[in-house]
Image (cartoon, grey):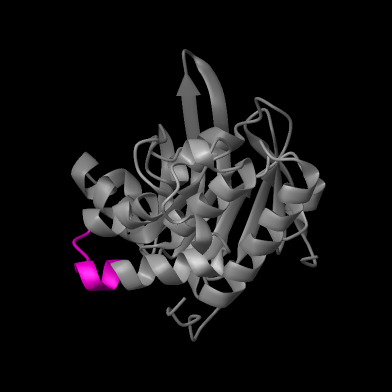
């Protein structure tokens, strides 16, 4: 891990202003506004159907809000073309999923290397960075294994390494422990917190789990597409 923690951890990274999203005539997000600082961890909580994943998709440029604005590093995502959004995702965002989403025909090392290939990192640097990351997430001994040969915990560790390979400013995680047993889930949460601290990478975490939210500095509670509460936490 060779990216320094930002010198100004209080710098604003992400701003959502009055974000709204409607599907089939139903308002899924309504007037959602919040800010996220560099290096900060934020949990999005709330019942199923509250709009958490839709909001995460909008933050990642996968979905577009019908109303409002989302700015990442001062760039309004809604003003970008599809190709420009893809560039933002490749360079500035990392994503972690509940079901890992590793490519089944690539080894663990190749899965981690893929985002570096997409942005044109030189082969020698790719190899060095992949090796460092796999060692840091403690699966370097499984570098040549295919996803089907890995345990759930190992797959999520590889997925975290892949999400961090291109040194993003922001990690988006959708229920990253939802498909793991309690022991592996706790280990993944510990790893996410440590890596966020080490790299200065901000984290937005969608979760139903109080234990997962507890690694964050703040939590926002959504209900029926609206923010109903915001709380400051002391990361456990």
Percent from the top left, x then y, of residue 197?
61, 74
Q: Up-down: is 134 above or below 230?
A: below
Residue for point 47% across, 40% down: 147
The answer, for residue 230, to whether it is visible in the render is no
Whether residue 121 appears in magenta in the rendering, the answer is: yes
Residue 90, quarter of the rendered image: bottom left
Residue for point 56% across, 54% down: 157
Residue for point 21% across, 67% down: 123
On the picture, is 42 further left or further right than 185?
left
Percent from the top left, x then y, of residue 89?
34, 51
- Which residue occupies the foreground of this view, 192 or 59? 192
Q: Up-down: is 132 above or below 88?
A: below
Q: Which residues are magenta?
A: 119-126
Image label count: 0
Residue for point 55% across, 79% down: 9
The answer, for residue 163, to whether it is visible in the render is yes
On the picture, is 74 further left or further right than 212?
left
- Residue that sits furthest to the bottom in the current view: 7
């Amino acid at each position: 891990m060779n990216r320094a923690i930002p010198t100004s951890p209080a710098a604003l990274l992400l701003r959502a202003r009055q974000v709204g999203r409607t599907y089939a005539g139903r308002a899924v997000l309504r007037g959602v506004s919040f800010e996220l600082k560099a290096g900060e961890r934020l949990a999005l909580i709330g019942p199923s159907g509250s709009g958490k994943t839709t909001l995460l998709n909008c933050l990642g440029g996968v979905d577009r809000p019908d109303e409002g604005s989302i700015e990442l590093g001062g760039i309004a995502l809604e003003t970008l073309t599809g190709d420009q959004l893809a560039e933002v995702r490749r360079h500035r965002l990392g994503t972690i999923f509940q079901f890992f989403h590793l490519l089944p025909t690539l080894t663990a090392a190749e899965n981690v290397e893929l985002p570096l290939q997409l942005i044109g990192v030189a082969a020698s640097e790719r190899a060095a960075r992949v090796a460092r990351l796999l060692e840091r997430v403690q699966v370097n001994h499984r570098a040549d294994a295919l996803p089907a040969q890995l345990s759930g915990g190992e797959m999520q560790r590889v997925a975290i390494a892949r999400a961090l390979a291109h040194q993003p400013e922001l990690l988006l995680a959708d229920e990253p422990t939802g498909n793991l047993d309690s022991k592996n889930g706790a280990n993944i949460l510990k790893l996410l917190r440590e890596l966020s601290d080490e790299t200065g990478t901000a984290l937005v975490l969608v979760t139903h789990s109080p234990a997962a939210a507890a690694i964050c500095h703040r939590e926002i509670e959504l209900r029926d597409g609206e923010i109903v509460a915001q709380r400051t936490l002391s990361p456990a």
